[in-house]
Structure formats: structure tokens, C-alpha cells
Image (tube, rainbow, N blue to C red):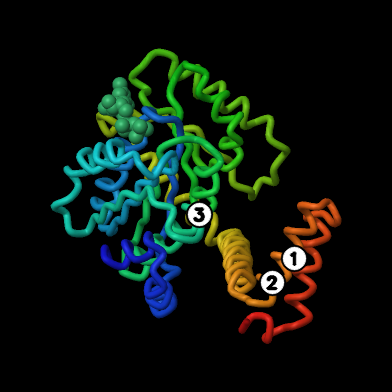
Amino acid sequence: MSRLMTLVENGEPSAISSIQELFPYTGKAVTVGITGPPGAGKSTLVNQLAKEFRRRDKTVGIIAVDPSSPFTQGAILGDRVRMQELIGDPEIFVRSMASRGAMGGLSDTTIDVIALLDAFGKDIILVETVGVGQDEVEVMRAVQTVIVVGIPGSGDAIQALKAGILEIANIYVVNKADREGADQAVSYLKQLLSLEPKKAKSEWRTPVLKTVALAGEGVPELTNAIEKHHAYLTSTGKGQEEEAARIKHQVMTLAQRELYSRLSRSKRIKEVLAEKVEAILKRETDPYSSAKELADLAVEAESPVYSG
Ligand code: GDP
């Protein structure tokens, strides 16, 4: 599994055929994303969650995603060291990931690594991201349950809002509840969440939980909340609806990439593109019309263009 993950990260074509072969064995795992600002205690919390799920007889896969840079070996090593205490339990598999892969974005690579863990029978897959940018939001779209972790004070709740991250939370956690201001943070968040458009009684309401990850306090309750959200997704059919949306997005992304690659390989397209570039340079035409013409050409010519 570890070697397959490396192939996936490196964008090796052989990884794709492995994913294709393993795909029928996927779709069983519960996937959980944990995001929030650096230092909020995500790694500590993920550690504790993994242990709690093990106590509940579940096997666990952990993916620590760092989109900030492909060169943050330090941070990755830090994660590895902190997660070291979990290793030794063969049912917990930890993988750090910073590489974008050869082709797609980090979220595409994450989807494939999740698929591998799933196919290899991990019951619970915890995906932890290191920051709170657009990349992280994108990665969080790949999982079923999103946990956003904040801490008391420091205006983190507002920052999370700005990054558009509160909207994607299914569970909100105020960690470091041993610090002053935890209760205020909880009531502040509850208030923010109550401003959301009115929901039907049957709809999921984002709970706000308090944890002290260092001491494991609140972790069983958080685990219960994850299980409850999973039960909600299953019983309402919402889970399947969301999975369909994820698959649709993934297939369209892959198709787009496939088209791009076919276009770039076609001799005819290359020739026309060179002509268009010349014409654009001379301001005889513009990039928009040229792109349209290339697309038309590709569609009209069908396979002969592609085989170029
Ligand atoms: P991450 O960057 O979000 O993954 O945060 P870490 O898990 O690395 O935690 C950052 C720091 O906060 C570490 O020094 C942890 O030991 C500490 N920490 C984590 N959880 C708690 C907590 O509940 N209370 C307190 N006081 N410190 C915590």
C-alpha cells in the first residue's frame, strides 16, 4: 500500500491501473477531515481520535496533508515524530503528503490515497490538513465528515469564517479548552452557526464541542459526534447524494485533464496553436477566439486529431 501511495504521489501511470483494479473494493471506509489554523492541536487531536477508534475496534488510516509547500520537510518530519507513538499498532497507518503529484492538485492525490486506504480495509480514514487556505478547503471536499478545529481567543473563529471554512464544517471543535475563554468561544460559534439559513428539523446541525486534546478530554464525545454524523448521512441518503457530487466533480476534473493531454499531444493542434500564437502576438486575433477555434477543431476532427 505504501509503495502504491508513492506511485500515486509521483503521478506514475501504473498507479492509475492499480487504482482502477482496486476501485471495486472501495466505498466502505468512513472518511473524516480535520482542518484549522496551525497550532490549533489538529495532530494531537488526530492522535487521540485514532486511539479512540482503535478502542472501538476500528482500523485507522491517517493522511497528514501539507499543501503549503512541497519543501516543508521539517513540518512533515514533525508530524511523523508526533505520530510515532501511534506506529507500532499495525492497524494504524500514517502517511504524510506534500507532493502535488505529476498532474493533478493535492486534492486529487488525496482522493487516490484515500481510495488505497479504503481498498486495503481501513475502517476510518482521518485526513489532516496543516493550514486553512483554498487548497485545504479543496482537500476537505474529498471527505464525508469535516471537523474544523479552533482555539479560544485569538480571533480564530473569525479567521476561519473568512477562509470560508466554517461553512464546510460538520462538527466544530474548540480545542485547548483548558485555556481561558473556551466557553465564550463555544457560545460565539454557536451564535454564528445559528445565523445560518433556517434548517429543517431533520437536517444536520453543526455541533460545537470542547476538547483538551493533550489530555484526551472530549475525545470520546467527538468520536460519538463523528459516528452520529455518519449515521445521519446514511439514514437520510445525504451521504450518497454527496458522494455522487464528489464523483461527478472528480470525473469532470479527470476528463478535463485527459482532454488537455490529448490536445497537447496532437500534431495538428500544435501547428494551429503555433499559428494562433503568432497571430495573437500581432494582435490579429485574441486568446479567447483562438481557444474556441482550437476546441472546435478538436471536436470536429474527433479521433484523427487526437491520434495526431
Ligand atoms: P496542529 O499544528 O494544529 O497540528 O497542532 P499540534 O497538535 O501540533 O499542537 C500544537 C501545540 O498545542 C502542541 O504543543 C500541543 O502539545 C499543544 N496542544 C494540543 N492540544 C492542546 C490542548 O488541548 N491544550 C493545550 N494547552 N495545549 C494543547
Q: What residue is shown at x 63% (from left), y 77% (from top)?
A: 267
Number of the label disc, if any, that sits on residue 161? none
Image location of residue 307, percent across then percent down: 61, 84
Within 10 Å of the Cα at label 2, are there few (<14), some (14-19), or many (20+) other Cα atoms? Answer: few
Within 10 Å of the Cα at label 1, are there few (<14), some (14-19), or many (20+) other Cα atoms? Answer: few
Q: Are marks 1 and 2 in contact (CB under 8 Å)?
A: yes
Q: Ligand 1: does it lie within 8 Å of the C-beta at label 1?
A: no
Which residue has dot 3 on it?
A: 105
Q: What residue is shown at x 62% (from left), y 67% (from top)?
A: 260
Of tags 3 and 1, the one toward the viewer is 1
Q: What residue is shown at x 69% (from left), y 71% (from top)?
A: 271
Image location of residue 12, percent across then percent down: 39, 69
Instruction: Place residue 1 in its image quadrant.
Output: bottom left
Mark 3 and mark 1 lie on one chain; the one further toward the N terminus is 3
Mark 3 and mark 2 lie on one chain; the one further toward the N terminus is 3
Q: Is residue 258 visible?
A: yes
Image location of residue 72, percent across then percent down: 34, 39
Q: In 3D space, how far apart are the residues under numbered discs 1 and 2 (Cα atoms)?
A: 6 Å
Which residue is nearer to you in this view: 165 or 182? 165
Element assignment for label 3: loop
Question: Quick check: 275 above or below 124?
Answer: below
Q: Name the kind of residue labelled 1 in the image.
A: Glu
Image-based side of 102 in relation to 296, left or right: left
Question: Quick check: 297 above or below 148?
Answer: below
Which residue is nearer to you in this view: 211 or 66? 66
Which residue has dot 1 on it?
A: 275
Which residue has dot 2 on it?
A: 271
